[in-house]
Amino acid sequence: MTTPHTVAPSERPHPWDRDAPHAHVDLDALRHNLALLRARTAPGVRLLAAVKADAYGHGLLPVARALAAAGAEAFGVATAAEALALRGAGVPGDVLAFGPVRAGIAELVAADVALTVAQPADLEAIAAAAAGARARVHVKVDTGMGRLGLAPAEARALIAAVDRSPLADLEGVWTHLASADEPDATEPDSATHRQVAAFAALLARLERDGLRPRWAHAANSAGTLLLPEVHHDLVRPGIALYGQPASAWLARRVPDLRPVMRVDAPVTFVKRVTAGTPISYGGTWCAPRDTVVATVRLGYADGYPRSLSSQAEAGHRGRRVPVVGRVCMDQLMLDLGPDGDAELGERVDLIGGGAPTAFELAADAGSFAYELLTRIGPRVVRRYPGT
Ligand SMILES: Cc1ncc(COP(=O)(O)O)c(C=O)c1O
């Protein structure tokens, strides 16, 4: 099975990739971030890397292979297709599907993928589809996220039902933190603290009932980096592996993350314009003086936010230059200044490198790094220097 950005090496490179925007994925930076997260956890705590959504846009298989080789024990995915892509490629390690699945259960069980049960119907679906094979199950409990799972009191009955089921192995119990990247996360009266306490109380009760499964887990990146009390048996970082802080508050507390992705794109046209010349759709930007404008092959269809029209900077020859006029579907324009110059085909940094980071650009676009990274489209060729 292939996923959009993980074509077999023989299919890459295409001669025309030279004209495409490139996402350079720095696997050394990925390994650095993994080590940084590891350094925050006690020995014996497992690390499950969140690699859903094509490893947050970085390319599922190259990222998962690099993480597995660097010691990540498990992988978290959102869909059956992502889980089976990992298994199909033979990436070592456990795989947990975070979301309840209805389609493909038999294939997932046969592929030894662990499944999430958030409600009795999920267990019934597994029992109906598993064709006699035992499914590995992690029960999701809602301690305050409000997305999936039963509250702890009701979840206990579900956990007991999984434990009794002849078609399921109760392997884990987990919850998800809603606000661990907020400035109050480490305060004793915070929403995060209430989640942490509710989960700990549930685990204590399961222990007393003889139902405590092997893997209890709750920590996303923020929890892994800042809340040791919620590490339990396994942590599930995502965004920090990719070198982006989950929030500005976290960025100040954990300054050593290294961005993994840098996006650059080639200049396709250069022109000298006179003062007053309108640039791009709607003429929303007119040259304030005679200047040189470069057109670059990256647009909103590639994931560069249109809301950054005239609101962002790019990196060109060691300096920052403004993005001017509306960002188009496939192209955007840069004001290189009156003395500016660019070669056709010359590459300009748009995300990371000489340009602002994904975290900074996303904030300026009214979004956050998760969305910016996962929207970088399939026309942006992923490259893995050094592999
Ligand atoms: C269930 C689950 N665990 C872990 C993560 C990783 O979170 P983060 O990227 O904030 O570290 C996610 C991502 O949203 C998630 O949905």
Image (cartoon, rainbow, N blue to C red):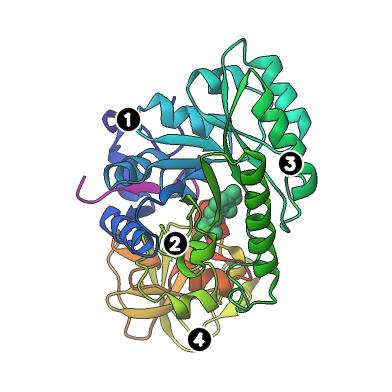
Q: Which residue is mark 1?
A: 8
Upstream in sequence: badge 2 or badge 1:
1
What is the crowding at mark 1: few (fewer than 14 residues within 10 Å), some, or many (at least 20)?
Answer: few
Upstream in sequence: badge 4 or badge 1:
1
Of all residues shown, which one is farthest toward the right?
Answer: 154
The amino acid beneath tag 1 is Ala
Let me know if residue 351 appears in the view. Answer: yes
Tell me the distance, in whole angstroms, between the alpha carbons under discs 4 and 3.
70 Å
Type of secondary structure dominating the magenta stretch: loop
Of all residues shown, which one is farthest toward the bottom?
Answer: 289
The circle drawn on residue 335 is none
The answer to whether the residue labelled 2 contacts the one labelled 4, judged by CB atoms less than 8 Å apart, is no
Q: Quadrant of residue 199?
A: bottom right
The circle drawn on residue 156 is 3
Tell me the distance, in whole angstroms, between the alpha carbons under discs 2 and 1.
27 Å
**Highlighted magenta segment, given as a residue range:** 375-387
Upstream in sequence: badge 1 or badge 3:
1
The amino acid beneath tag 4 is Ala
Tell me the distance, in whole angstroms, between the alpha carbons under discs 1 and 3.
45 Å
The circle drawn on residue 240 is 2
Q: Which residue is mark 4?
A: 275
Query: Which of 315 and 276 lies nearest the eye of the viewer?
Result: 315
Tell me the distance, in whole angstroms, between the alpha carbons under discs 2 and 4.
44 Å
Q: Quadrant of the C terminus?
A: top left
